[in-house]
Amino acid sequence: MKKIALAVFLACNSGLLVAEEVAVEITAEQVQANATEAPITQLEPMQIRAEAIASSLLLDTPSTAGSRLDLTPRETPASVTIVDRSLIEQRGATNTQEILKSVPGVLAASPPGSAGSVTYRGFGSSSLTQMFNGITVQYDAIAARPVDSWIYDRVEVVGGPSTFLFGAGAVGGSINNITKTASRLGDFTQARASYGSFDTSQLSFGLNRQLGDDVGVKNYLRADINRTNSNGYAEGNEREAWSGAFSLLTDITPNLSHTLALEYQNEQDDRIYWGTPLLRPASGPIVGNGKIADGTRFKNYNSADGIYEQTVKWGRSIIDFKLNDATSIRNTFYHYDALRDYRNVEVYKYNATNTAVVRSSPLLQRHDQEVDGDRVELSYKTDIGGMKSDWAAGFDYNVNRQTRFPRSLTLNVSTVNPYNFTTEKFFDIPGMVRGFNPQRTNRVETLAFFLENRTKFTDQLSLVTGLRHDKIDLSVKNHQAATATNPAYFDRKYTPTTGRVGLIYDFTPTANAYVQYSTAADPPAGILTTAAFTQVRDFDLTTGKQIEIGSKFDFLEGRGSATIAAYKIVRKNLATPDPNNTGTTIPVGQQSSRGIELAASMKVTDDLTLQGNYSLVDAQYDKFTQVVAGKAVSRVGNAPTNTPTSIANAWFTYNITPTLQAGADVRYVSSRYGDVANTFGDASYTLFGAFASYKLPKYGTLTARVRNLTDEVYAASVTGDQMFYLGAPRSYEFGWQAEF
């Protein structure tokens, strides 16, 4: 027995010295085989685990974004970025879009008409997949509106085509927002309170508890609640948001568990800011960098009672069953319900002399969306000819229904002095009446089958493959008068097959190189959830393909880690006007991008940590025409809108004392075009930030933070030649957070 005790002691302590998870198992049979004394008491199987602390790049943390095989980013032949809870808090990311600033090459903004606006690897929101807990609602540009970050545990991002994982879309990449859920790691309570510029306040609370004793069925409860309130930096704007995540984890047996997860989000944005009009030249369109008039930065030209309101309800029922050490099954049933209301005057444009602002395009809109689905996943580990081989297979069935209720007018609502003005109540606009009339209901039914494998040919060389086949049935019911271009009913069926092949070679346990080829399938124009007859009548899904090479490695004896990736993506069959008949479109367009992404983290000293990333992308239209004054004009060689060539981020943290920490950050975004003609856009910008935090013994941490330190005026989104959606000015925040 002394030998057993010594072995356990050595196992526990040696685990602290390795860079990967270590497992030591001692069974009764092993004890009996080596025993020299008799009799002895039979022991239950015992397992001792030790895990190394991951670097800030989290290369050795299992991720669901890049694979269903429970691979780490280091084991995945693709660019995978994980932003975990500790980084979210350290960098002061208040919502899901701010979290994305930690990802190389990602540009995110939230203009109300496209609040989930993200650009990644040269592609915009309609060609990206933004998910919640691995589930896409197929309406990313709107449904992925930024949510306050308190209820999220981490965000995982994979670059490039990934339809083989998550379904149609995902040409530029996939983003997975993962909610906090009940944990077996013990009881704790968390709280946060903050106050800052524009009367912005936050109150957050969370707890995790084991219910009952440790005998028989075990239950674990987690609840997280957040409330945020702000007056906003635009005049008259007020926002209030609530979010909550609740989950109950039940270990029915050692091999069978069930998780019930519920989420609720409610956001009301009164007199929401839509943008600031651009000064116009004496004649012709805007050329070069757009400019705003002094004194208009914070002006809000929306209706006095303009509004955006959203209520989201999520439900997930997850069953995990472990058949044996090699085989496990997971079933996820999910339900999503969202209701979004808009009433706004949405376009502001200077008159010819830049002396007045013309307000136009009032819109009353409702989105009523529901998604129901079930996913079954089988994991299996085996050997093939002496080679370790891991498998994941399953199917996903879901039905996405959305009804839209638009009431829009093309009239000019009013012309106002840019500086001194009042705006009307929305329903005082002629032609605008209360109530909602449905336009059309889109129903997207998807049945998908998927298969993944990782086979280790040697200890150094691995092959990772994936395959997915989708059967997509789109049906649209027109609730208004039928026409030739808008029939009473139509449907389309799509059957894309997508996949991935990747090789990884490990030079050492902490340094590798990889190559990957992957494909994607994308809706022909916009998103199937909102597709109209003319958008899908003559087109199949467009296709995307990518070749990527890269490396992931540690350096400086483990004090640093880095990743590098180079890629080329081609998207074919874009809808583009027919040069011979500009009233129709043909599927001959093509867009491509190629680029390099770098990320690194280094602990320079025990107290100083440097982190950063950089992306360079060359995105262009290879085949594309645009109708101008009734004529088709080629835009070949031009860059897509709102796509910067380069983005760079850096973070510095320094431990002044064991209780006092200070840090700074810098973000650079290069210039972007606002139109496909590439005639105008916004200049590059650089943002600086800083923070200081102080740990109170037993009473949490106090943090003071400043964002946009130099008060840079910049466009967060450049999507038109009439106005810019400006980014936030300099702001301050003081916060307290504790865990008990």
Image (spheres, rainbow, N blue to C red):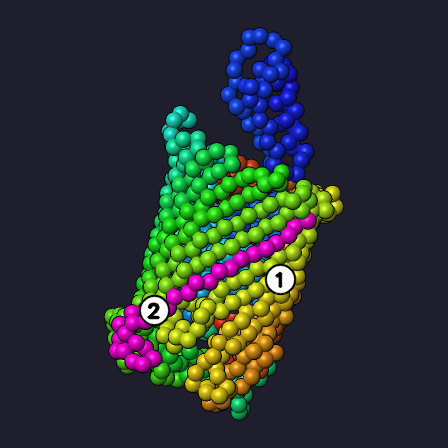
Q: Which mark is residue 235?
A: none
Relative to 351, say whether 540 is above or below: above
Residue kind at label 2, given as amino acid type: Asp
Q: Earlier in the sequence, mark 1 or mark 2?
A: 2
Q: Is residue 475 left or right of residue 612?
A: left
Q: Is residue 241 left or right of residue 658?
A: left
Q: Disc 1, disc 2: CB below 8 Å?
A: no
Prevalent SS, magenta region: strand
Find out whether residue 490 is within the magenta segment: yes
Instruction: Give residue 413's position: percent from left, percent from top.
Output: 35, 82
Is residue 591 visible from the viewing direction of this image? yes
Tag 2 secondary structure: strand
The picture quadrant where one finds residue 480 is bottom left
Closer to the camera in the image, 720 or 170: 170
Q: Is residue 484 left or right of residue 87?
A: left
Marks 1 and 2, Cα distance to the nearest angstrom? Answer: 34 Å
Q: Which residue is label 2 attached to?
A: 491
Instruction: Give residue 326's position: percent from left, percent from top.
Output: 51, 36
Relative to 554, say whether 25 is above or below: above
Residue bounds of the magenta highlight: 476-505
- Which residue sits at x=61%, y=40%? 385
Instruction: Give residue 12's position: percent from left, percent from top.
Output: 62, 27
Residue kind at label 1, given as amino acid type: Ile
The picture quadrant where one finds residue 337 is bottom left
Quadrant showing the N terminus:
top right
- Which residue sits at x=68%, y=33%? 17
Q: Which residue is label 1 attached to?
A: 547
